[in-house]
Image (tube, rainbow, N blue to C red):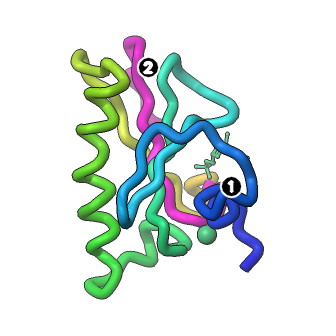
Amino acid sequence: MDCLFCKIIGGEIPSAKVYEDELVYAFRDINPQAPVHVLVVPKQHIASADEVTVDNSAAVAAIFTAIPKIAAAEGLGNGYRVITNIGEDGCQSVKHMHFHILGGKKLPESMA
Ligand code: 5GP
Ligand code: ZN
């Protein structure tokens, strides 16, 4: 499958890894929008959060278990934001589900 994040998970395309476990891979966004900008992805290809089902939801649970660990390791004790973009209106540019962790500064109040 021609998927950028599958290639990053597989090591075919290099990335700055910050966390990995059996189900989850996390790496620094190449175009950071905040002092800390990490992408957390399932190793299994799931196209977006709109494709989550009871059969693949273990990956989502693993992601949300990893997020607090990554946030702590990145020094985000004062808070942070988790975002997932979905589809055209959500401006999702990579069709492999990913959760942005943004932090390291006071983020804008507006989300849209
Ligand atoms: P989206 O817009 O789909 O929610 O987010 C995709 C994110 O992937 C963007 O923030 C973009 O900067 C990041 N990105 C795109 N290509 C690469 C890449 O090759 N490496 C890394 N580390 N991040 C990427
Ligand atoms: Zn993929």
Q: Which residues are magenta?
A: 92-112
- Which disc number belongs to residue 108? 2
**Circle 2 — which element?**
loop
Q: Residue at x 36, y 65 (%)?
A: 22
Q: Secondary structure at mark 1?
A: loop
Q: Amino acid at mark 2?
A: Pro
Q: Amino acid at mark 1?
A: Ser
As for residue 96 lying within the magenta part, the answer is yes
Disc 1/disc 2 C-alpha distance (Å): 22 Å
The residue carrying pointer 1 sits among few (fewer than 14), some (14 to 19) or many (20 or more) residues within 10 Å by Cα, namely: few
Residue found at x 45% / y 49%? 40
Q: Quadrant of ligand 2?
A: bottom right
Residue 49 located left or right of residue 34: left
Specify the quadrant of the image occupied by residue 107.
top left
Respond yes or no on whether mark 1 lies under 8 Å from ligand 1: yes
Q: Residue at x 63, y 66 (%)?
A: 6
